[in-house]
Amino acid sequence: MPTPQTGIFALGDIAHIYLEFVLLPGADATAFVQTVVDLDGPRSTLGGVNLVIGFRPELWRAVAPGDTPAELSGFNAPLPGSGDYTMPATQADLWLWIAGSAYDNAFDNARAIMTALAPFARLERELSGWGYRHSRDLTGFEDGTENPGLAVAPMIATVPDGEPGAGGSVLLFQKWRHRATEWEALPDAAQELVMGRTKADSVELDEAIMPPTSHVKRNTIEVDGAERKIFRRNTSYGNAAEFGTVFVGFSSDQWRLDRMLRRMSGAEDGLRDALTDYSTPLTGAYYFVPSLQALQLFAGEDA
């Protein structure tokens, strides 16, 4: 089995920087990928961080057609939901996640990476993330309660052995801005009905009282009675005036991520996730995060 990029599962980092780049017109895709893979150099020099690399599915397919899941595609068009609700598409060509125990190391790495990639790509978006109260979202609820443990997470988050892209992962990356004033005006009991969990201890509500529009209900994906999970590495972003959640979701396939969004937006059955009344997606992109062995095929001699 090819080895996934280890930073996907490196829990405990508190400082995060996410960079999204768009390839410059005329830039050579293969040379670009080689340069990205060789970023291991400045990363090791500066030290103290994990780096996870993801490519637009169409770009990775162009340079590694045998290592890309067949049905995988970018978030290339907005996703219309029920009524006039829409989730935006802001697909870029490269996604980099820099994570470490201190922001200065992450910052220095980001600067070095931007310099190295400047001949090939422009920076489209930069976003800083951080942990809040150990494992809580800025809504006040626990985040990632249903995350699989690290013993089984690679089976949830990576393409199975023997399939195109084995050891790689499909990533959904979104920035969600919270409408804090409206959310905080709700009593805890009303917030719990929106989420489908208790606020204090993150216990799932009884089926008899859980609304079908609750966040838990809309995000639970089942096939033949078996739940299909994803692996979340969400963080918080922003300042005291404007803030929200950085959604970082890894899966072995794209369909469950796509179906999750369709259920949240109401595109599947007209029922929209109640949380979307209080949190708004500002970005949306899919990336393929290749295995270490797949990346090494593009590495220079000194990498």
Image (tube, rainbow, N blue to C red):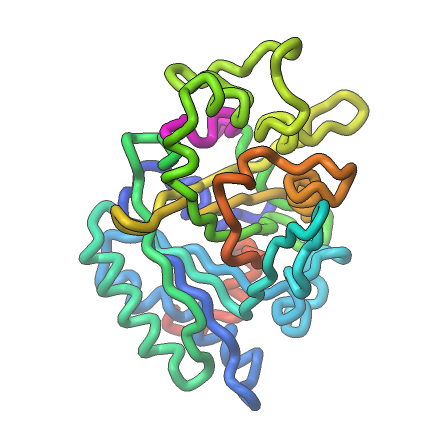
Frontmost residue, 199 versus 35 = 199
> Residue 43, image x and y in percent?
30, 63
> Residue 128, image x and y in percent?
32, 55
Q: Is residue 172 left or right of residue 243?
A: right
> Residue 41, image x and y in percent?
32, 68
Quarter the C terminus occupies:
bottom left
| Identity of the residue furthest to the right in this view | 224
Query: Could you tell me which residue is drawn at 22 percent across and 65 percent down?
Result: 108
User: Is there any visible trace of residue 6 in the rendered image?
Assistant: no
Residue 149 magenta-highlighted? yes
Query: Could you tell me which residue is drawn at 53 percent across and 33 percent down?
Result: 153
Frontmost residue, 111 versus 268 = 268
Occupied quadrant, residue 62: bottom right
Occupied quadrant, residue 204: top right
Position of 195 relative to 51 (above/below): above
Query: Could you tell me which residue is drawn at 20 percent across and 49 percent down?
Result: 102
Q: Is residue 204 left or right of residue 111?
A: right
Occupied quadrant, residue 157: top right
> Residue 65, image x and y in percent?
71, 67
Magenta stretch, residue numbers: 140-151
Total marks placed: 0
Residue 179 magenta-highlighted? no
> How would you classify the magenta stretch by its main secondary structure?
loop
Position of 240 relative to 182 (above/below): below
User: Is there any visible trace of residue 22 in the rendered image?
Assistant: yes
Quarter the N terminus occupies:
top right
Query: Could you tell me which residue is drawn at 47 percent across and 60 percent down?
Result: 53
